[in-house]
Amino acid sequence: MSSYFSSLYVHVPFCMKKCRYCSFYSVKWSEEVEQVFIKSILREIKLCSELPHLFETVYVGGGTPSSMRPKTLEMLLKSLVTNFRFASGLEFSIEINPATVNLEKMNIMRDFGVNRISIGVQSFKDEELSLLGRMHSSKAAIDTIGLVIRSGFENISIDLMYAIPFQTVESWMNSLKMATSLKISHVSIYELTLEENTLLFKDLYSGKVSLPPEKDIVQMYLSGTEFLESKGLIKYEISNFAKKGFECRHNNNYWQRKPYLGIGPSAHSFNGKERFHNPSDLLKYSAILKYNSLMHIIDYRVDAKESLKEKVFLGLRTTDGVVLDSECLLNFFRVFEEENLVKIVGKRVFLTDKGMMISNELFVEALLHIENCPVCKQE
Ligand code: SF4
C-alpha cells in the first residue's frame, strides 16, 4: 500500500432498533456489543496508525454512532485524535440520530474536535417516521437540531427521504420547509429504495403499503431541488445541497477518488490501486483483531478500465461533472445531450436535472460502453 490515505471512515455497527427499510450491516445495540466493538476498534486504530496517512476529513458513521454511551464515545474519539495525523482545517463529521443524544455526548464530540454533525431525520411527519420504523418523532428531531445548535455546532446536515409509502408531494415539501426553517447548512435527500431483505419491502410485496406514483416521485425531486436552491442550499451532487462553503469535503474526496481508509466492521477502503473491506460481521472482525492483525478483503483491483468507469460514474454524480479525454466516450454522451440528459462543455460532461433523475440507467449504459468498447479501453 503506497498511497497516502487522505480520508478516514469509521463504521459504528449498531443501532438501538432496526429501521424497517434498512439493509445496511448493523446489529442491535447492547452493552456487550458496544464493549466488543470498542475493544476491537481501539486495536484497529493502533494498527492502522502505521499506514501512510494524513487525514483531511474524518467521518464517523454507521449504524448509529450516537447510540454509544458517553464513556465509549469518548474512548473512540480520544483514540482517533491521539493515534492519527490530521491536516490543518480537518473536517470531522459524526452521524447522530434524534433521541440518542444529550448535552453530555454533544460536549464530548465538540471537545474532541468534531465540527460537522449529520442528523438522520428522514421526515418531519410522524406517520412517515413510524412507517419507516424510525425511533423518533418529528418533535424529537426538531429538539435534537436545537440541542446541536446550542452545543455550538454550525456545520449541520440533515438527511431526508422521499418516495416513502403514501407520501404526497405536499407532505414532502412540508418536510423541506421545516428543514429550511431551522439553522442547518446542508441537506441530503434520498429516494427510498427497498431491498428484498427489509420489512418494508415485505409490506410492499404483500400489498400492505404502496409507493407514491412515479410522476409524484419525479415531482418530489424536481420541486425539492428548486425549493432548496431558492433557500440558498445549492445542489452540488445528485442528493446533496449545501450553503456556500458547507459542501461535505469527505464525500467530495470519495467522488474525486482520493484514497480513504475505512475502519470498523464492514468498512470499505480505497488505496488508489485496490478497493477492499473489513469483515462484515462484528464477531469475525473482533476475532481477527484479538490477534492484533488486520484482514482486508479485496473487492477488486482498479486497472485502467475500472479507473475510467469509476471516474465517470463518480464524477457524473457531482454538478462539476467529469472531464473526459476519450473522444469516443464524449461521442457516446453526445447522444444523450440531444435528449437533454447531459450537457457537454469542451471536454466536460454534466448531468442535467432530468439526467440526474435517471442517473442509474445512464451509469449502466456508460459502464457497458466502457466495458465493451475497444477504443475507450486504450485511451
Ligand atoms: S439508524 Fe440507520 S443504520 Fe440503523 S437501522 Fe436505521 S437506517 Fe439502518
Image (cartoon, rainbow, N blue to C red):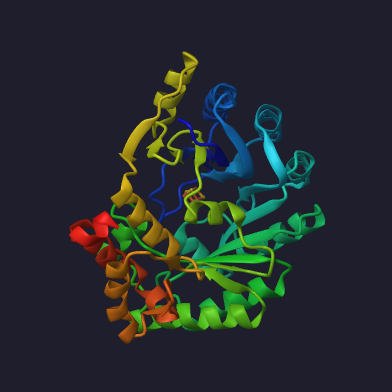
Indicate the quadrant containing the N terminus: top left, top right, bottom left or bottom right: top left
Name the residue located 40 percent from the left edge and 36 percent from the top edge.
277
Q: How many marks?
A: 0
Can residue 8 be seen here? The reply is no
Q: Residue 95: where, in percent of width, then height?
A: 60, 49
Can residue 352 be seen here? The reply is yes
Tell which of 207 and 41 is nearer to you: 41
Q: Residue 201: where, in percent of width, then height?
A: 31, 59
Indicate the quadrant containing the C terminus: top left, top right, bottom left or bottom right: bottom left
Q: Is residue 158 left or right of residue 266?
A: right
Q: Is residue 134 left or right of residue 92?
A: left
Q: Is residue 19 above or below residue 113?
A: below
- The image quadrant of residue 153 is bottom right
Q: Residue 305: where, in percent of width, then height?
A: 29, 51
Name the residue located 72 percent from the left edge and 70 percent from the top edge.
182
Name the residue located 45 percent from the left edge and 75 percent from the top edge.
167
